[in-house]
Amino acid sequence: MTTDPRFTWLFWTVWRRNLLVYRRIWTVNFLPPMLEPVFYLLAFGLGFSGLVREVHWNGQTLSYTEFFAPSMLAATVMWQAFLETSYASFVRMFYQKTYDALLATPLTVEEIIIAEIVWGATRAVIAAVLMLVVIALLGYVPSLHALAILPIAFLGGLAFGAMGMATTSVTSSIDMFNLPIFLVITPMFLFSGTFFPLTGLPAWAVGLAQGLPLYHLAELTRSACLGLLDASSLWHMLALAACAALFIPLSLAGMRRRLVK
């Protein structure tokens, strides 16, 4: 077992291993990201559009579906990246013993964990592209600036992938993931400006929501879809980068304590 904290480009071999596994069941992996936006748009877009005629966001007047559809891209990035580095990584580590096999090679813990986080971000980008195609075909992506969602999704995927891996590093059993999902991820999904603008919340709740990484990701995906990316978008990207910079070292330290005995 390699125990020194070395990091090299060997981490791509772990990323490639995950890609090969993903390709074997690609039909199962492709369907949910393609069908999910259709279900959400039908349930919320068509359902609420008759009740909410207009939504005011950043000086723009949008229909509810125009406001809502891009935020589902951000939510998809969050769910895909977090679930990949929490549940899926825990299965590889604890049940399949994949990490034990990898650590028997010249790979280090750092290379394995970074590869897992980058793979989580890759999964997020794939899902975001599939969802972007669907909502574009439905007419809710009027700007070519929406292509900026690819690097945005990757950055968001790194942030949420690192959060998931940090959670894995301190989770004793797979059932315990219900706690961060229920206490952190689900509230973020509901109160980060995804389903409604933050202007309808009390001031203290607005401040809290603006500190959540999904808020910044949703603002970026909405701005990209509508062709409204500007200098203020840099602030949201820096917030996501700061989130990744915080949780990646926590992931590495936590997983090193867990894997190196």
Image (spheres, rainbow, N blue to C red):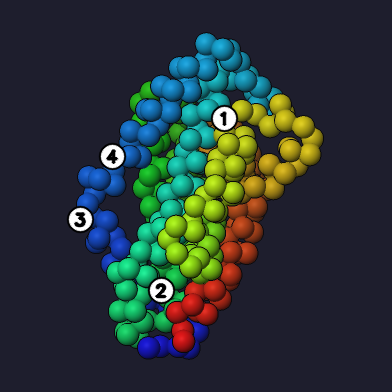
| Numbered disc 4: secondary structure | helix
Which of 236/167 is in front?
Answer: 167
Disc 2 from disc 4: Cα separation: 28 Å
Label 1, on which residue? 195
Mark nearer the N terminus (2 vs 1): 2
* Circle nearer the N terminus (1, 4): 4
Q: Which residue is mark 4?
A: 31
- Asked whether disc 2 touches disc 1, contact meaning CB atoms under 8 Å apart, the reply is no
> What is the number of the mark on residue 56?
none
Quadrant of the image occupied by residue 189: top right
Q: Secondary structure at mark 3?
A: helix
In space, the residues marked 3 and 1 are separated at their CA atoms by 35 Å
* Residue that sits furthest to the left in the current view: 24
Amino acid carrying mark 1 in the image: Phe
- Neighbours of disc 3 within 10 Å: few (<14), some (14-19), many (20+): few
Residue 211 can be seen in this image: yes
Instruction: Please tell me which residue is depicted at 36% across the width and 31% down the height of the picture.
Output: 134
Task: List the residue tagged with mark 2.
Answer: 112
- Mark 2 → mark 3, Cα distance in angstroms: 21 Å
